[in-house]
Image (tube, rainbow, N blue to C red):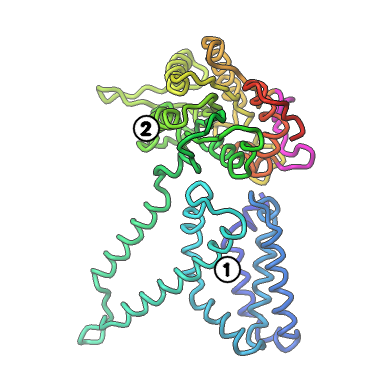
Amino acid sequence: RLQYGTDTRLAGLLVGVAVGLAAPALRRRVPGPLTAALGAVVVVVLWALAPADGGWLAYGGLLVVGCAAGAVGLGAPTLPAVVSGVLAWLGRRAWAIWLWILPVAIVTDPMRSGLEGLPQQAVRVLAPVALGAASVAVLDHLLGRRLVDADGRRRVAPWLIAAEVCLAVVLVAAAVAPGQPLTVYRQSTATGGTPAVVFAGDSMPYGLGSIVMGRKLDSEMGIAGRLAALPGCSFTEGDLINRDRVAPFNPECARLRDIFREETAKADPTMVIMLAWAWELYDRRVTNDDGSTTDFVVGTPEWRERFAADAQSALDDLSRDGAVVVLLTMPCVDPDADTPNHPTSSATEPHRVAEVNAMVRQLAARNRDKAVVVDLDGEYLCPDGDYRAFIDGQLMSSDSVHFSQDGAEKLWRDYLGPRVAELLGLPDQAGA
């Protein structure tokens, strides 16, 4: 697909190589300052207009950004000394700066830091530059020490290698560890009587709840949103089978059930919105006590029995203090949807979503006193069996699984929010 040719770092590297090779000839033919200025304007404009969920960036946008940055580099030597000096300074540290971009982006996620809007963007731009510059300075200092043997051969100090490996492990662990910030978002010690609504499950309710709370949609409705979610995790244990590949069960995911209990105990919710089915679309392999394995294939009687037991236990955890649990059906996973990215896993097989949603409805039927189904699949996102990537011109998802930020807001305002308000007995939220 097109994005595989443009949404890669290779494209940027190739643009840089092309600029380097063509620079001597081009500089005699194009006005340097004007070329650099136009390139800078294009970079800034595209950065300001870039959608949060990628969108057109994956279909040539990043290539355009790379070409614009190449134009800046092409004209840099003709710029005033101060400007060209700054660009040269950044260029010598570009690799280190790039390495810090992802860790900074993860740490400054609204769910972890509370940063949003311009302050968040400022930190995400300035922090990698500062950290990259500091990293280069430290390495220059260390490598400037005597690392050459008496015979002139260069040697690398073992302690330096060990220190770099340890630092990398610590930084990666700090960036990706779920920790408490992943399950609590600006949680108040008391709601003052405001109904608390907990979003429970995996990355889907995590993203949805984050937008509802981050954009104050919960306070607009008169509720207090909370999270009890762990992205990438299922309440069902076992190795994940994806076609011919088997991924070991992540032991960190065993915390999800504890998170359900802990966060509902803190929030004392009136309602829990549960969407925890994305990882249930995969077959599971469980290792028995004798070392043998048992596969639970979606749709088989064994799988249904196991799913029913695990889902019931999770529902009991979420409703134990009297909360009503809204069970959202799993939207169809459509590999042909008009979304920027297209899933290719076994989850795209239609019978899997159908089986999971049937079990969700049965779960609600067995628990009529504390559970109700709201149909994201048949009523809103996949009414005809195909994923509605755009609703009223708004992109709903980047991959027919994870909600885009604006798509999550539209889903809440147009469909889910009014139903939540109705169940809670709040004023009609239609058109809010």
Whether pointer 1 and pointer 2 mark residues with C-beta atoms closer than 8 Å, the reply is no
In-front residue for pair 193/104: 193
Question: Marks 1 and 2, Cα distance to the nearest angstrom?
Answer: 41 Å
Q: Which residue is mark 2?
A: 254
Mark 2 residue type: Ala
Residue 316: which numbered mark, if any?
A: none
**Mark 1: which secondary structure?**
helix
Question: Which residue lies at the image location 48% right of the left edge and 39% below the top edge?
Answer: 188
State which quadrant residue 342 falls in. top right
Instruction: Please state which of the two labelled residues, at mark 1 or mark 2, is closer to the viewer.
Output: 2
**Mark 2: which secondary structure?**
helix
Mark 1 residue type: Leu
Count the labels in the image: 2
Residue 13: which numbered mark, if any?
A: 1
State which quadrant residue 150 falls in. bottom left
Instruction: Classify mark 2: residues with Cα within 10 Å, few (<14), some (14-19) or many (20+).
Output: some
Q: In the rendered image, is residue 239 in sight?
A: no
Image coordinates of residue 396 in percent, x first then y, are 69, 39
Which residues, given as a range, are shown in magenta? 379-395
Image coordinates of residue 8 in percent, x first then y, are 59, 58
Along the horizontal axis of the image, is 408 left or right of 283? right
Question: Which residue lies at the image location 30% right of the left edge and 60% below the top edge?
Answer: 166
